[in-house]
Amino acid sequence: MYHIPKVYQEILTNMKPKILVSRKISDLAEEKLQKEFEATLNPKDEPIPESELIKLVNDYDGMISTGFDKISENFFNNLNGKLKIIAQVGVGYDNISIKSAEEKKIKVTNTPNVLNEAVAETTILLILAASRRIGEAYNLVRTDNWKNQKPDLTKFMIGNSVTGKTLGIIGMGRIGRMAAKSARAFGMKIIYYNRNKLSDDLEDGAKYYSDINTMLPECDFLSIHTPATAETKHILNSSTINLLPKHAVVINTSRGSTIDDDALIDALENKKIYAAGLDVFNNEPNLDKRYLKLDNCFVLPHIGSATHETRLAMSMMAVDNIYCFFNKKPLISEVV
């Protein structure tokens, strides 16, 4: 029987796993990754089409991905068996075929918790911007049209107050609870719909509704904080929107698939609700262009977690998941 010479055994033992990073991540995280692994970075942050990603990844043991990458069933069906883990930078992973990953026995991780505060901040930003007509006011000044407006104290840029209003939350997870905590600073009353009722300490005075249809008529503001699943797809549709008061404001910082665009746009166009503040959309970044024509819809380009501190923490957690996997330690945040 042939025995591998000791010198070659040592070389094989000391070989570092190869890691592909699909998009640019934080500099400190890249430096940390390069110390432990043979890493291929994407310093120019060039998007990699799925067909090219398949060709590249078959030479790697692990990959750090982002929500911009399409990692479908086709991706997994074309793997050669070398890839062992995908560490997603982001809490959401609806861009990854989780079923296919399970079938191929490829680990998938994400980066929860570290972005709770940033997304909650964005939720409050949208609540204020949509209710106080900030988009309209901003455009008025930037286009130098302020001087052409009549200073009517009863009509000029009059919006709705936030203080003391009722905020309904769909999905009272970590981000939903953080948004509720922030909203309480404005004296808002918190009500929520969730799969299960929370414990008293987690509720922190919020009122639970087991039936979403019963909660919606009570909402001055409605904020969505659910993952993208079959159950949450179009949870806000024509039927549920029609249950909201006409003065209601819809906020979404979760996933675009939770909203039926046709239904929401119809409600905004026909003043069935007051306004909307959206950071996420179906088919990002190619959102429905009808949103851009609505003065009562304040839109952002999916920047909920976009702070220096949060993106660094997300990048670091992805790298740490890679490190834990190849050093046979428990994963920090395992999806499958």
Image: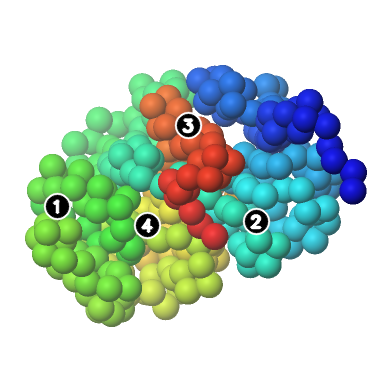
Camera-near label (3 vs 1) is 3
Give the alpha-carbon distance from disc 3 to disc 4, as whole Å: 24 Å
Q: Is residue 323 above or below residue 333?
A: above
Does label 1 or label 2 sit earlier along the sequence? 2
Q: What residue is pinned by disc 1?
A: 188
**What kind of residue is marked 3?**
Met
> Could you say which quadrant of the image residue 130 lies in?
top left
Q: Position of residue 170 (x, y in %)?
A: 33, 64
Does label 3 or label 2 sit earlier along the sequence? 2
**What kind of residue is marked 4?**
His
Tag count:
4
Question: Quick one: SS at disc 3?
Answer: helix
Q: For the C terminus, which image quadrant?
A: bottom right
**What kind of residue is marked 2?**
Ile
**What kind of residue is marked 1?**
Met
Camera-near label (3 vs 4) is 3
Q: Colour mode?
A: rainbow
Camera-near label (4 vs 2) is 2
> Could you say which quadrant of the image residue 238 lies in?
bottom left
Q: What residue is pinned by disc 2?
A: 106
Q: What residue is pinned by disc 4?
A: 225
Give the alpha-carbon distance from disc 3 to disc 1, as whole Å: 35 Å
Give the alpha-carbon distance from disc 4 to disc 2, as whole Å: 28 Å
Q: What residue is pinned by disc 3?
A: 316
How would you rate the neighbour count of disc 1 (Cα within 10 Å): few for under 14, some for 14-19, many for 20 or more?
many
